[in-house]
Image (cartoon, rainbow, N blue to C red):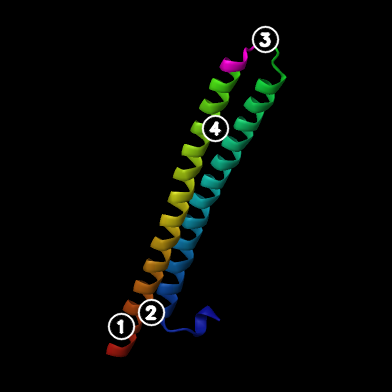
Amino acid sequence: MIGTLRPEVQVSYQSYKAEALLLKLSQDERLQEITDKTHFTMVHLNALSSTKSLGKNERKRRLEAIFSEYSDFMVQAVTIEVADAIDNIMQNILRALLFTERMTQK
């Protein structure tokens, strides 16, 4: 099907595919980082719950530190995901407008 499209459409389509692939790779890296951080937090919580030598106040302090660090990380990760989604939408709208303008001028 690509061979039947005009050259401008082919170039635009190839550019779109390359950009989508790079976006998918960066998103996969972020999701892997989120998974790793979640696993790390769960392991620490399990270790903390199985430790008998900690006092009540020390356990509470460590729990607060773990949850504070994890929640900060998750807020940052979700913020990046939402910002990237909005940026992607805006880029696609701009690309469609520019492509339409180019095609109507010919």
Q: Which residue is mark 4?
A: 67
Name which residue type carries label 3. Answer: Ser
The three-letter amino acid code for the residue at tag 1 is: Arg
Cα distance between the residues tagged 1 and 3: 71 Å
Query: Is label 4 in a helix, a strand or a loop?
Result: helix
Q: Is residue 83 left or right of residue 68?
A: left
Q: Does 20 lie within the magenta span?
A: no
Magenta part of the chain: 53-58
Could you tell me residue 99's position as x and y percent?
Answer: 35, 79
Q: Is 30 above or below relative to 58?
A: below
Under circle 1, the secondary element is: helix
Give the alpha-carbon distance from disc 4 to disc 3, as whole Å. Answer: 21 Å
Q: Residue drawn at (54%, 40%), measured in percent from left and top? A: 33
Label located before the other in sequence (2 or 1): 2
Separation of marks 3 and 2 at Cα, in angstroms = 69 Å
Question: Sequence order check: which comes first, mark 4 or mark 2?
Answer: 2
Q: CA distance from mark 4 to mark 2?
A: 51 Å
Q: Residues within 10 Å of mark 2 (few under 14, many from 20)?
A: few
Numbered mark located on residue 53 in the image: 3
Can you tell which of label 2 and label 1 is closer to the viewer?
A: 1
